[in-house]
Image (cartoon, coloured by chain):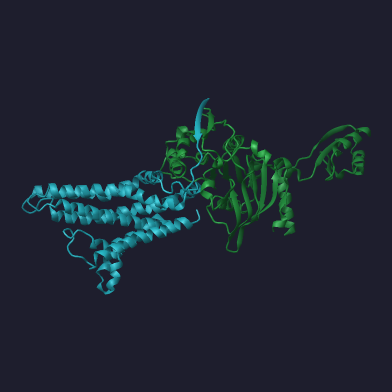
């Protein structure tokens, strides 16, 4: 049911041709001269913060992932249903949905691990699977739990993967290990690694591609709170470097804390897509007001043409503005003050992504 | 704070090089770091030859009248028979590990994510497997060849041409067994099942089927029959299944090509 999809996009996040000049550029299309990535690392730190020059390589597309009517069927069951996904470059993008919603299946199709039943995909501007080799050269990914050869050391495991990538990937092994804080344990066999260390090694392996796009599928599964915190910082660090991170998760809180943009997926379909701020606001402008006389305030608010609804709540009056309510907030505050009311609270109301998610999914259940 | 600089060059397109020795080196690394596998291969090839010649030398030293010299053509023939069988087992172990190792550990998915052609990933396994098993089998053969020549005493020593011919034949049998196991394990995705099936076929069923004359020309298609047709006549007297050299060569080519094609196809099409 593609018509059920709601799209909320902040204009500031839609990239114009002019915007591309200031964007990190994909290396696939740049001039042959090598770019230099500078990594500043704190020796001994568990996750080494890095500074990296903005990518100067060329490129054109504003989206690192574009899908059109992408569908995957397993017999009668549709795991991914007509998905239209656009992931803007340089963002942390959350792909959020309950278990079994089709998140991993979509990622597996993007990475060429399984074939799509129908639809089209573009990865870093390249059509896949036609040009998946070139596209994936600049993509790093962790799908579900990262897997390794237990009988090899961490460094040897990276070496195996580097052999399948461009020759320069071998030169990135030390820096990648340092970045995830595994330099000291790199020569130990992976079968002795903890789950957290394996996750970090998985990230190091992803960095061998010098990725423009990092796809992380449920990356914090099994991590302790400290590990989750480190992971969040690391992901934000990648975005700060100009990389794009696609984070698939069923943990709303995690996505809300890490991501700038989000797509909510349910039963194989994207039901909502937009910036976290827009989604949390529910697409409507809502403000919370507390005054010295709430009855009088409600009377004033109800009479205002810019107000769609005003409801009393424990923390004040929740005021939902109409769509064409530009300047309404200023006018409302002026009227309340002129009426002699003391304003104790006047702020944009914000609901959590979790509330929004539950609101959407319950609406879908009612529709179904 | 320390600073590390990494130079990131543009990726090379996949059309520039479909097959690279780096991939072969990586496969070889995965194999040679499996201690159990390497020890098994050594134990199957080098160790029996060392033990055999120590026993033969000891017997000859203890009672020269009853036990002849440890070397010579007859002892080469006997030790080659054992070495061929055990080299086949070693090759099957290595081939099965090659075909199913990445799948079993889940690393096949990680390799596919690199964008590297699946066919290139599969193709790299063949030289890697041969790179491990042939030197080990070669070392076993070197012990046999040296022992049969140095300790020939009064017996006829094998000629240089016979030794070369024997080495090439042993290499062929080992290589074909490896490719067969690699292909089957790439199709099945299971090391254990592959070892059971291929060992059973090569070492149990084939010798039985070869002996059933009622099968007629069907026996010509057996790998064991074809490889023994090419064996040095001085070592193995008489051919079990009579066939032309060309027919034997074609059968061997088919036993190489079909498993490789099947394994390559399955590697290409399988969900990672």
Q: Which chain is green?
A: A
Q: Examine the rendered structure and indicate whether residue B163 appears above or below residue A261.
A: below
Q: Examine the rendered structure and indicate whether residue A184 appears above or below residue B217.
A: above
x, y percentage for residue A228?
A: 59, 38
x, y percentage for residue A168?
A: 46, 38
Say which of B106 and B219 sits in front: B219
In the picture, measured across the screen, residue B37 lies left or right of residue B69, that is right
Q: At 62% across and 43% down in the image, what residue appears?
A: A60
Q: Return the residue found at the far top.
A: B1
Q: At 47% across and 48% down in the image, what residue appears?
A: B15
In the picture, measured across the screen, residue B255 lies left or right of residue B170, that is right
Q: Return the residue found at the far right.
A: A339
x, y percentage for residue B103?
A: 45, 52
Say which of A292 and A217 sits in front: A217
Q: Return the residue found at the far front.
A: A31
Q: Examine the rendered structure and indicate whether residue A276 appears above or below residue B270.
A: above
x, y percentage for residue B243?
A: 24, 67
Q: Which chain is cyan?
A: B
For residue A62, what is the image quadrant? top right
Residue B153 visible somewhere in the drawing: yes
């Amino acid at each position: 049911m593609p018509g059920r999809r709601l799209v909320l996009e902040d204009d500031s996040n839609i990239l114009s041709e002019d915007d591309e000049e200031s964007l990190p550029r994909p290396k696939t299309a740049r001039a042959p001269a090598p770019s230099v990535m500078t990594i500043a690392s704190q020796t001994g730190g568990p996750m080494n913060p890095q500074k990296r020059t903005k990518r100067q390589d060329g490129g054109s597309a504003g989206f690192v992932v574009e899908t059109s009517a992408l569908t995957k069927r397993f017999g009668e069951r549709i795991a991914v249903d007509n998905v239209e996904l656009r992931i803007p470059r340089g963002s942390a993008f959350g792909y959020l949905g309950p278990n079994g919603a089709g998140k991993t299946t979509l990622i597996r199709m993007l990475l060429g691990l399984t074939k799509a039943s129908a639809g089209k995909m573009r990865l870093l501007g390249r059509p896949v699977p036609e040009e998946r080799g070139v596209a994936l050269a600049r993509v790093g990914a962790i799908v579900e739990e990262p897997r390794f050869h237990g009988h090899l050391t961490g460094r040897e495991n990276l070496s195996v993967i580097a052999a399948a990538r461009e020759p320069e990937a071998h030169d990135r092994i030390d820096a990648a290990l340092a970045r995830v804080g595994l330099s000291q344990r790199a020569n130990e066999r992976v079968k002795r690694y903890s789950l957290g260390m394996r996750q970090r090694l998985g990230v190091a392996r992803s960095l061998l591609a010098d990725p423009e796009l990092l796809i992380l599928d449920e990356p914090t599964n099994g991590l302790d709170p400290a590990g989750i915190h480190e992971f969040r910082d690391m992901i934000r660090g990648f975005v700060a470097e100009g990389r794009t991170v696609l984070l698939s998760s069923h943990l709303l809180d995690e996505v809300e804390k890490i991501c700038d943009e989000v797509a909510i997926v349910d039963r194989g379909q994207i039901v909502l897509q937009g910036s976290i701020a827009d989604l949390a606001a529910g697409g409507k402008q809502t403000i919370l007001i507390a005054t010295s006389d709430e009855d009088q305030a409600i009377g004033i608010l109800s009479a205002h043409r810019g107000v769609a609804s005003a409801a009393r709540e424990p923390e004040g009056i929740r005021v939902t503005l109409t769509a064409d309510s530009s300047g309404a907030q200023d006018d409302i505050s002026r009227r309340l003050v002129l009426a002699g009311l003391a304003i104790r609270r006047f702020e944009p109301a914000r609901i959590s992504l979790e509330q929004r998610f539950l609101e959407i999914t319950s609406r879908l259940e009612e529709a179904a | 704070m320390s600073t590390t600089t990494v130079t990131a060059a543009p990726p090379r397109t996949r059309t520039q090089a479909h097959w690279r020795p780096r991939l072969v080196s990586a496969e070889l690394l995965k194999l040679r770091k499996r201690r159990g596998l390497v020890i098994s291969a050594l134990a199957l090839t080098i160790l029996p030859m060392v033990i055999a010649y120590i026993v033969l030398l000891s017997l000859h030293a203890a009672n020269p009248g009853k036990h002849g010299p440890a070397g010579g053509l007859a002892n080469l023939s006997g030790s080659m028979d054992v070495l061929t069988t055990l080299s086949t087992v070693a090759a099957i172990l290595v081939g099965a590990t090659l075909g199913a190792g990445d799948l079993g550990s889940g690393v096949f998915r990680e390799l596919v994510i690199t964008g590297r052609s699946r066919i290139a990933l599969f193709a790299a396994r063949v030289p890697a497997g041969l790179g491990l098993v042939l030197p080990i089998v070669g070392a076993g053969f070197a012990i046999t060849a040296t022992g049969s020549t140095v300790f020939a005493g009064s017996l006829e020593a094998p000629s240089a041409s016979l030794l070369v011919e024997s080495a090439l034949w042993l290499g062929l049998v080992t290589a074909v067994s490896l490719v067969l196991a690699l292909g089957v394990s790439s199709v099945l995705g299971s090391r254990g099942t592959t070892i059971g099936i291929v060992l059973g076929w090569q070492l149990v069923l084939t010798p039985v089927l070869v002996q059933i004359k009622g099968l007629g020309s069907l026996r010509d298609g057996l790998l064991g029959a074809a490889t023994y047709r090419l064996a040095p006549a001085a070592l193995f007297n008489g051919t079990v299944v009579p066939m032309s050299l060309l027919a034997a060569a074609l059968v061997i080519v088919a036993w190489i090509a079909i498993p490789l094609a099947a394994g390559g196809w399955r590697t290409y099409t399988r969900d990672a």
